[in-house]
Image (spheres, rainbow, N blue to C red):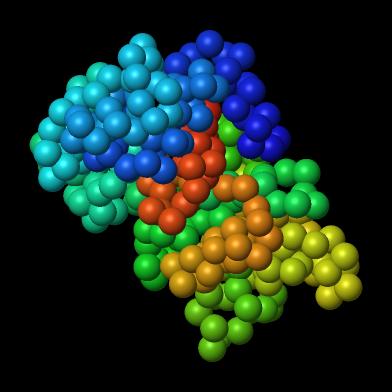
């Protein structure tokens, strides 16, 4: 299943959730919102500076749209107000606008008004890469800096559940390292072996987890065959679980800038999906992130 197919499925479902956008007064954010409105996949509560938001909506030809409601507030208050809207069931998804990631996550984790569940929050990106007929998921490229073994298990479980909700049932997870053999001097290989066993023992469910695997033999059947790496995941991975944020961030940006891949990304582990895109992400990436969040929510319903 590819990204435009997901958009079509949402459009045909006739379900339009409401997305609360924190600090929406940004041109690229509104461009992403406009794509979603035109595709009829969501409605929006736009929190922030009314005059600027109205200006960008007019520029997009969306003034007066029934799918858009401006909620005037100071940008400093926008993150908490957007999160509160989701907590109070006035919206179903929260989305980052022109507000820092730390500010939005502080609101998401607010003890009284936030969306805590007790689970690890993790980032998953779905890439449509030229030459692949399936989405490739990467986790975690933006949230957890140096996760320990148990955090990695939760990150993988979050990604498995998400991928299944998007349309990749029982996904194959490659736990990445620099090599495909366990090396006591390389902690990621030890963690990968432990995570593989945790999956076999039912501590990670609804997917197949194998590692350590290097990137080439995780996604290329030819590389796996050449290196003599066997298993259900080798050469056919759906989810790439990285050892740390540096690896994830570099892989994420390499796919975007070198491979020109299409991408959407969501934060998981809260009571509702969180669309948390980079300020450098295109309007298209913001649109696909919205679509992924909506699709995962629809499957839950």
Question: Which residue occupies 32% across, 42% down?
Answer: 26
Q: Position of residue 13 (x, y in %)?
A: 57, 14
Question: Which residue occupies 54% across, 88% down?
Answer: 185
Q: Does any portion of residue 286 appear in the rendered image?
A: yes
Residues 202 and 93: in front is: 93
Place residue 24 in its image quadrant. Answer: top left
Above/below status of 65 relative to 207: above
> Position of 112 compared to 249: left or right?
left
> Position of 69 compared to 131: left or right?
left
Picture quarter with the N terminus: top right
Question: Which residue occupies 44% across, 36% down?
Answer: 31
Q: Position of residue 76 (x, y in %)?
A: 13, 45
Above/below status of 292 relative to 14: below
Q: Does any portion of residue 204 appear in the rendered image?
A: no
Question: Which residue occupies 61% across, 14% down?
Answer: 12
Q: Position of residue 123 (x, y in %)?
A: 44, 52
Above/below status of 130 relative to 219: above
């Amino acid at each position: 299943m590819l990204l435009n197919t997901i958009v079509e499925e949402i459009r045909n479902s006739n379900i339009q959730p409401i997305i609360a956008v924190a600090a929406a007064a940004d041109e690229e954010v509104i461009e992403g919102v406009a794509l979603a409105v035109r595709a009829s996949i969501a409605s929006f509560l736009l929190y922030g500076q009314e005059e600027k938001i109205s200006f960008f909506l007019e520029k997009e030809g969306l003034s007066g749209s029934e799918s858009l409601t401006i909620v005037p507030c100071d940008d400093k208050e926008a993150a908490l107000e957007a999160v509160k809207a989701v907590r109070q069931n006035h919206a179903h998804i929260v989305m980052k606008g022109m507000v820092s990631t730390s500010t939005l996550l502080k609101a998401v984790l607010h003890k009284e008004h936030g969306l805590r569940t007790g689970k690890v929050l993790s980032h998953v990106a779905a890439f449509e890469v030229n030459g692949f007929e399936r989405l490739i998921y990467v986790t975690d490229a933006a949230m957890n800096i140096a996760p320990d073994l148990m955090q990695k298990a939760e990150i993988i479980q979050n990604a498995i559940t998400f991928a299944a909700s998007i349309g990749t049932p029982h996904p194959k997870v490659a736990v990445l390292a620099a090599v495909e053999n366990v090396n006591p001097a390389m902690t990621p290989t030890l963690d990968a072996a432990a995570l593989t066993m945790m999956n076999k023992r039912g501590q990670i469910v609804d997917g197949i987890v194998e590692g350590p695997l290097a990137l080439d033999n995780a996604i290329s059947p030819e590389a796996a065959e050449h290196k003599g790496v066997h298993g259900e995941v080798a050469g056919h991975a759906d989810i790439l679980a990285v050892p740390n944020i540096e690896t994830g961030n570099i892989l994420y940006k390499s796919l975007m800038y070198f491979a020109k891949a299409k991408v959407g990304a969501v934060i998981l582990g809260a009571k509702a999906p969180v669309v948390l895109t980079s300020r450098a992400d295109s309007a298209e990436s913001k649109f696909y992130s919205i679509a992924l969040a909506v699709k995962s929510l629809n499957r839950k319903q």
